[in-house]
Image (cartoon, rainbow, N blue to C red):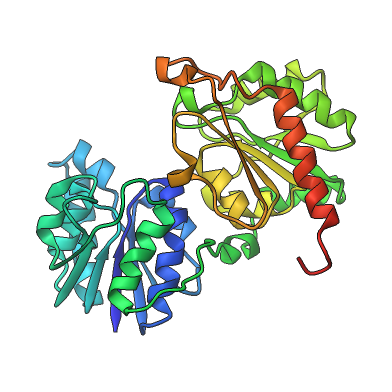
């Protein structure tokens, strides 16, 4: 059987959908994944993903009548037609995924029901609909679709990112080689929304405290974040440094080499947790019960002040001392773990 999985975005949600892809592929002959272009690297090369269908829907919606959009659409639709799926699984539940599900020629189309789909119109294009309780984790929402399709339960929840950890990334690898195995902690205070980010001053203070414990703090940064990361490095008194450029797919390889990862609710944090790196995740407005990282060594801290509800940035309840205590406790747990844990 050939499966088409539709999960276009976002970074963290694509990571959370990897267990669904692996579950489906374990029962099928071939699996194709429709995903946004900037995130395609997250699924390319996975042993449980055979084909990657790139759908740059954000560009298509911005310039619907341009020649480039028409060309890309034709290319995508040809690839979709050539794949000839037997079954489509729409794990997105949005209007933008609905048109791909609708365009696919398949006997069965499975997605979320009217109570679960984020945009209810999505449920109109599927034949079979699955509803889950409100607040269900994104990983488990996806696996509920696998359980419906395959008729069984018990699928692993931790995203398999081994293909990303193993994939060479020259800038990351050169940077790691220059460190000569000196241990470091990778920090990701930035996120997609200001209310989800960790305060820059507390991050700098954490860097100084962590360096005093003998662990080098390193700031990871993405598009538009380099200058902000550099300011934190400067404010740390030289105790911190900048990580090398690392696009989404390379984030897992970089994080897997870190002794510790401390990050806000964002894609790189989810990759680090899935890669098995001891991860302290900092949460505010988003519910970790639904969006928390999934991995073997994770500790979640949530700002209890509620300041983010008033639009106050920086997670003020999560001070450098609070995060340091949780980080050291997590590292101690790893050190105390029995061999092979």
Placement of the N terminus among the 4 image quadrants: bottom left
Question: In percent of the image, x 42 and y 16: which residue is there?
Answer: 311
User: Along the horizontal axis of the image, is 207 left or right of 140?
Assistant: right
Residue 79 seen in this snapshot: no
Q: Nearer the viewer, residue 136 or 103?
A: 136
Q: Nearer the viewer, residue 319 or 266?
A: 319
| Residue 267 point in image, percent of width and height | 51, 44
Dividing the picture into quadrants, the one containing residue 275 is: bottom right
| Residue 117 point in image, percent of width and height | 22, 50
User: Along the horizontal axis of the image, is 128 left or right of 47?
Assistant: left
| Residue 192 point in image, percent of width and height | 45, 31
Question: In percent of the image, x 20 and y 50: which residue is there?
Answer: 115
Question: In percent of the image, x 37 and y 74: which residue is there?
Answer: 24
Q: Is residue 73 above or below residue 299?
A: below
Q: Is residue 32 above or below residue 197?
A: below
Q: Is residue 106 above or below residue 177?
A: below
| Residue 56 point in image, percent of width and height | 29, 49
Dividing the picture into quadrants, the one containing residue 142 is: bottom left
Q: Nearer the viewer, residue 306 or 42?
A: 306
Placement of the C terminus among the 4 image quadrants: bottom right
């Amino acid at each position: 059987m050939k499966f088409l999985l539709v999960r276009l975005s976002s970074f963290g949600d694509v990571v959370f959908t990897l267990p669904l892809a692996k579950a489906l592929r374990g029962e099928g002959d071939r699996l194709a994944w429709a995903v946004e272009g900037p995130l395609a690297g997250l699924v390319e090369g996975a042993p449980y993903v055979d084909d990657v269908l790139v759908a740059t829907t954000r560009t298509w919606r911005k310039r619907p009548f341009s020649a480039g959009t028409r060309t890309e659409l034709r290319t995508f639709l040809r690839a979709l037609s050539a794949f000839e799926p037997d079954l489509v699984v729409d794990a997105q539940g949005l209007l933008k995924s609905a048109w791909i599900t609708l365009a696919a020629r398949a006997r069965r189309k499975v997605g979320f029901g009217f109570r679960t789909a984020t945009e209810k119109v999505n449920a109109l294009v599927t034949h079979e609909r699955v509803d889950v309780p409100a607040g269900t984790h994104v990983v488990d929402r996806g696996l509920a679709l696998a359980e419906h399709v395959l008729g069984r339960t018990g699928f692993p929840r931790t995203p398999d990112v081994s293909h990303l950890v193993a994939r060479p990334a020259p800038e990351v690898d050169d940077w790691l080689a220059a460190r000569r195995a000196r241990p470091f902690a990778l920090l990701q205070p930035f996120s997609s929304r200001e209310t989800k980010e960790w305060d820059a001053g507390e991050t700098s203070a954490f860097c100084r405290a962590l360096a005093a414990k003998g662990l080098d703090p390193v700031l990871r940064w993405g598009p538009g974040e380099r200058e902000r990361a550099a300011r934190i490095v400067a404010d740390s008194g030289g105790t911190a440094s900048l990580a090398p450029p690392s696009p989404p797919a390379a984030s897992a390889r970089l994080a897997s080499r870190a002794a510790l990862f401390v990050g806000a609710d964002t894609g790189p944090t989810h990759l680090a947790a899935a890669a098995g790196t001891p991860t302290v995740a900092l949460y505010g407005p988003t519910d970790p019960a639904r969006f928390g990282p999934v991995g073997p060594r994770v500790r979640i801290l949530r700002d209890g002040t509620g300041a983010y509800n008033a639009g106050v940035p920086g997670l003020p309840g999560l001070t450098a001392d609070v995060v340091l205590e949780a980080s050291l406790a997590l590292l101690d747990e790893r050190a105390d773990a029995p061999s092979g844990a």
